[in-house]
Amino acid sequence: MKEQLEAIRKGALEAIGGAQDTAGLESLRVKYLGKKGELTAVLKQMGGLSAELRPVIGQLANEVRASVEKAIEAQSAVVSERALRARLEAEAVDVTIPGKKFPLGHKHPMYAVLDDMKEIFIGMGFEIFDGPEVEQAEYNFTKLNAPEDHPSRDWTDTFYLTEDSSILLRSQTSPMQIRAMETHGVPIRMISAGRVYRKDEVDATHSPMFHQIEGLVVDKGITMADLKGTLNTIIREIYGPNTQTRFRPHHFPFTEPSCEMDIQCHKCGGKGCPTCKGEGWIEILGAGMVHPKVLRNCGIDPEEYPGFAFGMGLERLALGQFKISDMRLIFENDVRFLEQF
Ligand code: PHE
């Protein structure tokens, strides 16, 4: 039996020394010291021993049990220390590693131009108005003095939302002139920017949805000179102080007299090139003195309070400022394109 006990001790200590984790140690404890364990099995045979041998073997058995228990305890400390170290290593934070980079967006080039515009107008004392894209024909046409048979009223030109042609997607921001005069009253200096809709085929210079900036000034003593001075100031702020401009007579139902404003082509400097279609000039806006009928439609006396108005296409301004050749790029929102600005 002595040899048996020594063999158990040897086997147990070896196995315990090689245990890798707490679970392994626990199953070794059961294997050697448990009720059905090897040591218990040996002790059960003690009944057959002589009276002299019994205390000797008993003492040895206690020693073996004590040394196995001690070994388990020691190895348990080793194992949990090792586990802790592994966890600390796995969860370690290296504060010297550079942080992850998140892609930061930026303003769309067209809205960058719009924001520049707003800044300049605000600096000149203008207020900013917001208005509906779904508009009444009354505001988009009638109160703006558009005759019943005006071509832009046609269903082939404008997106109507009702059979009776009373509600539509605004085809211009000019209805904001009416809304501003009705809600604000005179004197007034306002701009209003937003989307407008027309039944145009998509090409390099057309889109069924585009953006306009509308402007309106109504005050005592306003003349065409104020119109020209204001627009020249704005355009030179945006395109540079040496930008050449010209005003051509034109027709709009809601202004009289009416004009269009051109800037000298930024690409060829006026010589004529594909960008300006050989003209040397690029049209950028329509404008004019507010028609007396329009002022009267809004309860304003045109003799006392004359005004001027203008409307410009925002996409075209952005194309010019950033030297972009195709308007479709503005709407496609391909980040490879947008990232360049
Ligand atoms: N609304 C006109 C257009 O879309 C532009 C314009 C606005 C002209 C204000 C004169 C005055 O073409």
Image (cartoon, rainbow, N blue to C red):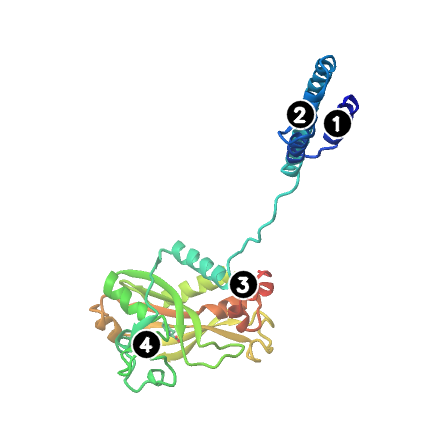
Any mark on residue 8, and which? 1
Q: Is residue 203 left or right of residue 162?
A: right
What residue is drawn where x is 42% and y is 81%? 199
Q: Position of residue 172 (x, y in %)?
A: 37, 73
Measured in 3D between alpha carbons, the distance from the residue under mark 2 to the one under mark 3, in whole angstroms, is: 112 Å
Badge 1 or badge 4: first in the primary sequence: 1
Mark 3, Cα crowd under 10 Å, few <14 / some 14-19 / many 20+, is few
Which residue is identified by label 2? 44
| Residue matched to label 4 | 168
Instruction: Judge: label 3 CB < 8 Å from ligand 1.
Output: no
Circle number at residue 190: none
Q: Earlier in the sequence, mark 2 or mark 3?
A: 2
Nearer to me, 155 or 128: 155
Closer to the eye: label 1 or 2: 2
Q: Estimate how packed mark 1 is, as few (under 14), some (14 to 19) or many (20 or more) residues with alpha carbons within 10 Å.
A: many
Give the residue furthest to the right: 3
On the image, the x and y values in percent for residue 109 come to 52, 62
Q: Which residue is mark 3?
A: 242
Point out the tag, 4 or 2, that comes first from the N-terminus: 2
Using residue 214 as the reference point, say whether residue 304 is left or right of it.
left
Q: Where residue 171 sits in the image (x, y, percent)?
A: 37, 76
Give the Cα distance between marks 3 and 1. 102 Å
Q: Secondary structure at mark 3?
A: loop
Mark closer to the chain start, 1 or 2: 1
Q: Which of the two discs, 4 and 3, sits closer to the camera?
A: 4
Marks 4 and 3, the one that precedes in the sequence? 4
Q: Quadrant of residue 61?
A: top right
